[in-house]
Image (tube, grey):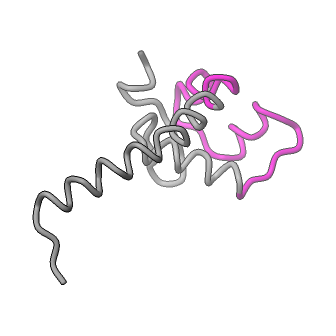
């Protein structure tokens, strides 16, 4: 079964509505942790983790940073994270 363009649009709108609260939670946590300040220069996960806490979970931090990058709040390249235009404002 193929979807027509109006069905694809409505699915995207539906997804955006229900994922909005998750995106806001991720952004709020990033602001609270000061992620934008930590990654002013290229930063590897270990450095970010040490700036946040002496005991951090690397795997969960990677998931969190990847979520930020997928939403356009930072960039990821070769395992390092850095600010983009969205996170500098």
Task: Name the residue rendered at 53%, 46% in the picture.
Answer: 80
Residue 37 painted magenta:
yes
Question: x, y (%) of residue 46?
Answer: 72, 46
Tell whether position 18 is magenta.
no
Q: Residue at x 39, y 30 (%)?
A: 84
Return the residue nearer the eye: 81 or 67: 67
Q: Which residue is drawn at 70% across and 27% down?
A: 33
Image: 68 above or below 58? above
Q: Is residue 10 left or right of residue 59?
A: left
> In screen coordinates, is 34 left or right of 82?
right
On screen, residue 75 above or below 62: above
- Look at the image and give the residue range highlighted in magenta: 30-59
Q: Which residue is at the front of the view, 12 or 43?
A: 12
- Quadrant placement of the C terminus: top left
Residue at the spot x=44%, y=49% of the render? 77
Location of residue 70 with respect to 28 vertically, above or below: below
Question: Within the image, what quadrant is residue 43 found in?
Answer: top right
Query: Which picture quadrant has residue 6?
Result: bottom left
Residue lying farthest right?
Answer: 55
Image x and y of residue 17, in percent: 40, 43
Which residue lies most toward the bottom here? 1
Say how many tags the image has: 0
| Residue nearest the viewer, comparing 7 with 51 | 7
């Amino acid at each position: 079964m193929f979807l027509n363009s109006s069905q694809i649009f409505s699915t995207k709108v539906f997804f955006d509505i229900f994922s909005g609260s998750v995106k806001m939670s991720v952004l709020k946590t990033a602001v609270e942790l000061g992620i934008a300040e930590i990654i002013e220069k290229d930063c590897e996960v270990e450095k970010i983790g040490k700036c946040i806490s002496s005991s951090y979970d690397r795997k969960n931090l990677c998931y969190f940073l990847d979520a930020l990058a997928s939403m356009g709040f930072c960039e990821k390249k070769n395992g390092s994270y850095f600010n983009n235009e969205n996170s500098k404002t």
